[in-house]
Image: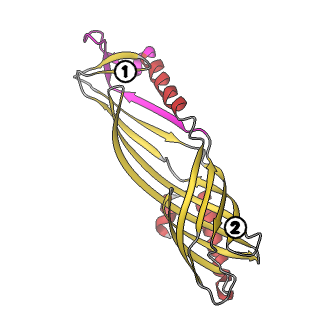
Amino acid sequence: MKKVVRHCGISVCTVLLAAVSYGQSKADSGSFGIGVKGSLLGGGVEAAARVTHRTNLRAGFNMFSYSRGFNKDNVAYAGQLSFKTVEAHYDIFPFAGAFHVSPGVLIYAGTPITANATVSGNQTFSLGGTSYLSDPSIPVTGNGSIKFNQAAPMATIGWGNLVPRKSSKHFSVPVELGVAFQGSPKATLSLAGDVCNTNGSNCRTIASDSTVQANILSEQNKINNSMRFFKEYPIISVGFGYKF
């Protein structure tokens, strides 16, 4: 639990800790369950507590990390995908069986996507459709990030129950499908160093050149436009649970 707290803010962790605390108060009556799962959000843990005969309160924490280098317009990026998310659901079992409908919320802790940018000295590159030369004396470096709305509503359906209603049943294999409505990703790009004209003349500091700054903003807008389709994030998960 200390590791979870370290990775998310107080407001984010409140959701998870409240559900766990509520579940612990229910544990003695056999209405509290925990589980592990794998999903498109990464590996995760979750806990659920029975609220009524046909409803549960469920919360979980997921982590996923992936690194990859890529090149865009001759700018080399070392990218890092680092999902740390908290999710909370209100599970509704309309037929009092395994099938459930679950409205909920997904909360991003930290910045999901970051990248370090480098352009080797004496190499040409492009910003907003304009070509520059990276000054060999002070090459271009920088960083970028992509964020989503911190809190995203979710809608999922699933099969399985971390808190089976049969007193003799303790194990479950929950499966869940759905979507998180996270909004359009928002990219930011920041560069430092010196640039020159492509023939090596007129070298100047990026921070002092308004035209270069405008082209950086144009490049940032191009990235945002290319990711407009990513307003929804698919949710697919399979887990294993145990009811106490």
142 or 208: which is nearer to us?
Answer: 142
Q: Is residue 179 above or below residue 48?
A: above
Q: Residue at x 54, y 29 (%)?
A: 225
Secondary structure, mark 2, is strand
Marks 1 and 2, how far apart in space? 51 Å
- On the picture, is 122 further left or further right than 145? left
Q: Which residue is drawn at 57% across and 34% down?
A: 228
Mark 1 highlights which residue? 126
The quadrant of the picture occupied by the C terminus is bottom right
Q: Residue 238 carries which label?
A: none
Q: Which color scheme is applied? A: secondary structure
For disc 2, the neighbor class at 10 Å (few under 14, some 14 to 19, many from 20) is: many
Q: Position of residue 177 (x, y in %)?
A: 60, 59
Magenta region: which residues? Answer: 184-211
153 or 132: which is nearer to us?
Answer: 153
Q: Is residue 240 above or below residue 103?
A: below
Q: Where is residue 212 in the image (x, y as percent from the top left)?
A: 42, 18
For disc 1, the neighbor class at 10 Å (few under 14, some 14 to 19, many from 20) is: some
Q: Is residue 189 above or below residue 203?
A: below
Indicate yes or no whether the magenta region holds residue 40. Answer: no
Asked whether residue 10 appears in the rendered view, the answer is no
Q: Which residue is drawn at 43% across and 48% down?
A: 81
Amino acid at dot 1: Ser
- Between circles 1 and 2, the one closer to the viewer is 2
- On the picture, is 113 further left or further right than 26? left
Amino acid at dot 2: His
**In the picture, residue 241 is in which quadrant?**
bottom right
Secondary structure, mark 1, is strand
Mark 2 highlights which residue? 100
Asked whether residue 161 appears in the rendered view, the answer is yes
Among all residues in the image, which is located at the extreme bottom? 168
